[in-house]
Amino acid sequence: MTKKEPVLLCDSEFQAELKDKIKSAQSVCLTTHVNPDGDGLCACLAVKRILRNLVPKVEFVVDDLELERYDFLQVQSEVITLEEAGNYDLVLVIDLHDSNRLGTRIKLAQTAKTVLIIDHHEIKEALLPADFAWIDPSLVCTGWMVHYLFQSEIANLTYEDKLFVGKCLYTTLLNDTNNFVNSNTNKQAFELAAKAVEYGANPAEISESYLEAHTAAEMKLIGTILLTLETMQNGKIAIMHCTREMLQQYGLGPEATSNLTRLIQNLKGVEAAVFVREESSDYYRLSLRSKTIDVNKIAVKFGGGGHIRASGCHLKGSLTEVKQLILNEIMQAIAAQEN
């Protein structure tokens, strides 16, 4: 059914709308952005577990099933693809608010009776057609938003379900704070971490499973990628890349490169870091990180988005052309910051 841009609500107003829609829903669909990360994906997993005893049918729809990194959360048994999905009374879109990052799953929102958005990214001009949205870029992660919305429901879960939700919430924090070292690490982050531990989450185990459990092949790939590292502007900018040939050499998929930007973003003297990954011929995905400039503005310019200090986008062209294009933008932003 045709929808317009959503009405933006504050936290309490949105919570009231959400609870009302859940009460009347017979089916709920959860979904997040393309190339899901540990925030959007794990926030959806948490909500699915919270709702499964409240709504007759709750499904989490993803693009594909290459999600091995989340095996510690039994992810394969928790998700389905668009081909397996049906029509839903309520669709919850988590960790995005624009149509471009939803991909072909935009169909889910187009056919649902009600669509609600939960997100903490910087707001773009064009929002995904929906009924209501709670979008607050000041919040540390969508895991925090999920906990705010469903804290009373979590309190009534069984120990096993509460433990699962705790693991999911802790992983959203690890993802969006880069293991509590990014500039968005604040009081909210530690309050949510404490709640996740209260629910049974083990920080050491989750950190090992999510951030450190690499295979030998993955470590070799990381080494190969690090060999491409270049710095410029007197060490203020660091950039590295991964080609499809590198992935094929070690028999790995794109998931093996998740969060690799964190390896170079905190190098001494680096103000901006870029990781470029080849997705297809002359088509690249870029991850941008910075301590000083607004990389979201740069990403939005190329149809991407994210946060002020962490964003991403896609660019067409040869590897050399793509790198030069993004480096020019970053150099201009750094120069403007210094003037």
Image: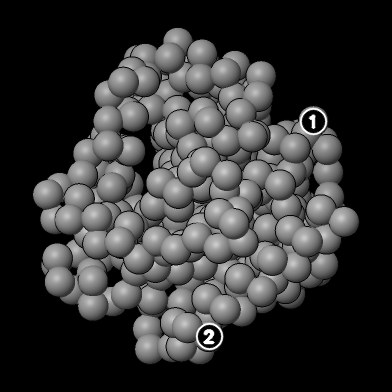
Q: Residues within 10 Å of mark 2 (few under 14, many from 20)?
A: few
Which of the 4 quarters of the picture holds residue 14? Answer: top right
Tag on residue 63? none
Query: Does 147 sit left or right of 331 as displayed?
Result: left
Disc 1 marks a residue whose amino acid type is: Ser
Q: CA distance from mark 2 to mark 1?
A: 47 Å
Query: Does 275 sit left or right of 292 as displayed?
Result: left
Quarter placement of the N terminus: bottom right
Disc 2 marks a residue whose amino acid type is: Glu
Residue at left offset 23%, top offset 71%? 246
Which of the 4 quarters of the picture holds residue 210? Answer: top left
Estimate the x, y position of residue 168 in percent, counting from the top left.
42, 33
Estimate the x, y position of residue 82 in percent, counting from the top left.
41, 69
Residue at left offset 15%, top offset 71%? 249
Estimate the x, y position of residue 301 in percent, counting from the top left.
72, 73
Tag on residue 321? 2
Marks 2,1: beta carbons within 8 A = no
Estimate the x, y position of residue 62 in percent, counting from the top left.
41, 61
Closer to us: 111 or 322 = 322
Q: Nearer the viewer, mark 2 or mark 1?
A: 2
Quarter placement of the C terminus: bottom right
Residue at the disc numbered 1: 12
Residue at left offset 67%, top offset 65%? 330
Query: Does 163 sit left or right of 124 as displayed?
Result: left
Question: Taking the image as drawn, is residue 167 in sight?
Answer: yes
Residue at left offset 71%, top offset 47%? 292
Please tell me whether mark 2 sits on a helix, a strand or a loop: helix
